[in-house]
Amino acid sequence: MDSKSFRRLLRKEQTPSEMRMWSILRNRKFGNYKFRRQHQIGKYIVDFYCHQLKLIVEIDGKIHNELGQSNYDFIRDEYLKSLGNYIVRYDNDTVYKWPENILADLEKVMKELNSKNQ
């Protein structure tokens, strides 16, 4: 499967938390910033990406707590950061149960990044 087909599959098979986050971020609803979902950067696909802020938002399930996955995430994050991106990670359960906490944190991060870029 090529990367474009794989990204399409990921968009079709979102977790409930990813669906909730996308409903907030899509169509410039949050801070009037454009986000892309399942966006490819290099060989990696990120959950949500705002090019203007170089902000990556990852929604993580329990698998990300496992040693092999956390090592992979570390290597991936280092690569993405080396390109000038800022990465925030939120837990699936927190996004789904307490989205207001995630949005408050994300708004703070976005303000900080916006002030750095000006």
Image: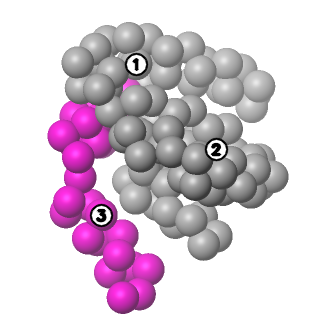
Left or right relative to 110: residue 33: left
- Residue at image mark 2: 54
Please report whichever mark, 3 or 2, sits nearer to the chain's N-terminal start.
3
Label 1 SS? helix
Q: Please, which residue is most extreme toward the front here?
A: 67
Q: Is residue 29 visible?
A: no
Residue 10 painted magenta: yes
Q: Which residues are magenta?
A: 1-30
Q: Say which amino acid is labelled 3.
A: Leu
- Residue at image mark 1: 102
The 10 Å Cα crowd at callout 3, few under 14, some 14 to 19, many 20 or more, is some
Please report whichever mark, 1 or 3, sits nearer to the chain's N-terminal start.
3
Q: Say which amino acid is labelled 2.
A: Lys
Q: Position of residue 90 (x, y in %)?
A: 45, 29
Q: CA distance from mark 1 to mark 3?
A: 22 Å
Q: Nearer the viewer, residue 80 or 112?
A: 80
